[in-house]
Amino acid sequence: MAANVTYIPPKAAKPETLRVAAYCRVSSDSSDQLHSYATQIKAYTEQIGAHADWELVDVYADEGLTGTRMDKREDFQRLLADCRKGKVDRVLCKSISRFARNTRDCLVALRELSALGVTVYFEKENIDTGTLTSELMVSVSGALAQQESISISQNQRMSYRRRMEKGEFITCYAPYGYDLKGQELVINEEQAAVVRYIFQQYLNGCSVERLAHDLTQMNVPTGFGQSKWWDYPIRYILKNEKYVGDTLCQKFYTTEHLPFINKMNHGEREQYYIENTHPPIVSREVFQKAQALLEKKSAKNVTHIAHILSLKICCGRCGTSYIRRVSLNGFATWVCRKHDRKAVDCSNGRIPETEIYAAFVRMYNKLKENADIILAPALKQLDDLETAMQRENPAMLEINRAIAQVAEQSHNISKLQTAGLLDADACAAKLSSIQTKLTQLRRERRRLLEHDDIEDAISRLHQTADTIKSGPEQLDTFDESLFEELVERIIAESQTCIRFRLWGGVELAEKVRRAKR
């Protein structure tokens, strides 16, 4: 019996609409109006709108941002996110150098877009990533774009150097106590009063730790608008030549190869000291006295502490402190005292000093990149615990209200002095009286607070978080001052693993290599 076959013709294919987006980026100081930020947005909108089968998704544009780091470009990241959501079929871009100036990041992004079925067309190079041979071409062009970025960076550094040599280069941002108006530093009178207070109190014998505590209690906002002060920014203020009207150029420098990293200049690059570049906040006499006192205290600390790691390392197995040993060839190691006296008493052997330094550098860089993930939960738990404890103690609430009122008085007095309605002597007398009252109230609060260690842990952990926030973006070598600011204790679990206990109680483990015998 013959099969009954019915022919079903295919449906007429509907014209497919291509969802197209554009990405553009220009420097904010570009003088080329044909390629300006606004012009590119307008041009791409018209170009996509001219195709009947194209649908404009959006024009993604970043202005005045670096092209060497993709994570700094908000709209580029938004474009990638929309591609991942399936909102985009095709991306238009002026050139590869506009898309990315780092070959590795460029190819990573293009491979991801290719996997998502999104093609990219670069107008200048006439490259369409939908073709088979595009990746090789992009790699070559990307390398050229990367070299272009390095060349631009070198030109900028040369321009800065020439300006510094002529005494023209001052700063790109205003330090605490100043505002940046155009290219000039102008005194911010409200903040300048705080700077003068810091210098005056320090020369009167007040420690930087005490100053940080007092400014916090006085509700004086920091340069970042925070309410908590720490000793690190106060030391920076005391050492900063900007406050006598001078400028030390190139305190930091940028590496010459990708990825560009900003580093503190410890003599690796030339520096230029320019006098009288802007109005001073304190006199040279006051500033020089502060430097002498800082140097004197630093020398005193060196006398009492033989080594930065002394009394910092303890054995994770027996609890004994570690001791430094130096071989005849100068190789330094740290070892458990019990093991050093008799190896059978403790199995924890020697750890090279250089490995401890390297472990700290690795730990800091991880913490800098993931501070919010690591520190924020611990801070929230401690803050919630303290809040719960104080909520159950009416006397504590009353003390806290009194402290807040006195601190508000202190803030108002500072405002009156800034406005010129209260002279310095009267202000100092009133602030001294307020400080005495605050000391009494805080002593009463400590008496009521049964868990002093919680309040101290919160304060310490906030200090750690602030130090990380204000610290360098990338640490390449061991930094003693940063180590002191962050690390309370090192616990040597074994010869291959140590734990850094930060101020505030957070502990982070790092692997180390054993000492060679």
Image: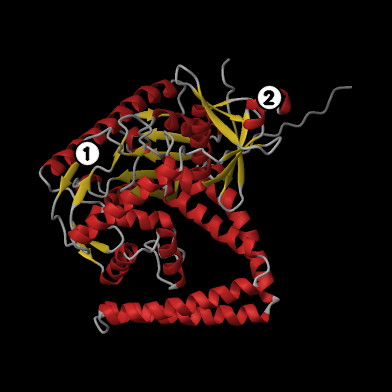
Where is residue 412 shown, x and y percent of the image?
37, 81
Position of 498 with respect to 6 (left or right) is left
Local packing at callout 2 (Cα closer than 10 Å; few below 14, some 14-19, many 20+) is few
Q: Nearer the viewer, residue 210 or 93?
A: 210
Q: Amino acid at mark 1?
A: Gln
At mark 1, the secondary structure is helix
Which numbered dot is residue 156? 1
Task: Tell me if residue 247 comes above or below residue 360 in the rendering.
Answer: below
Q: Nearer the viewer, residue 310 or 100?
A: 310
| Furthest residue in direction right, as rendered | 1
Give the mark nearest the N terminus, 2 or 1.
1
Where is residue 426 shown, x and y percent of the image?
29, 82
Position of 155 with respect to 378 (left or right) is left
The mark tally for this picture is 2
Where is residue 79 shown, x and y percent of the image?
46, 45
At mark 2, the secondary structure is loop
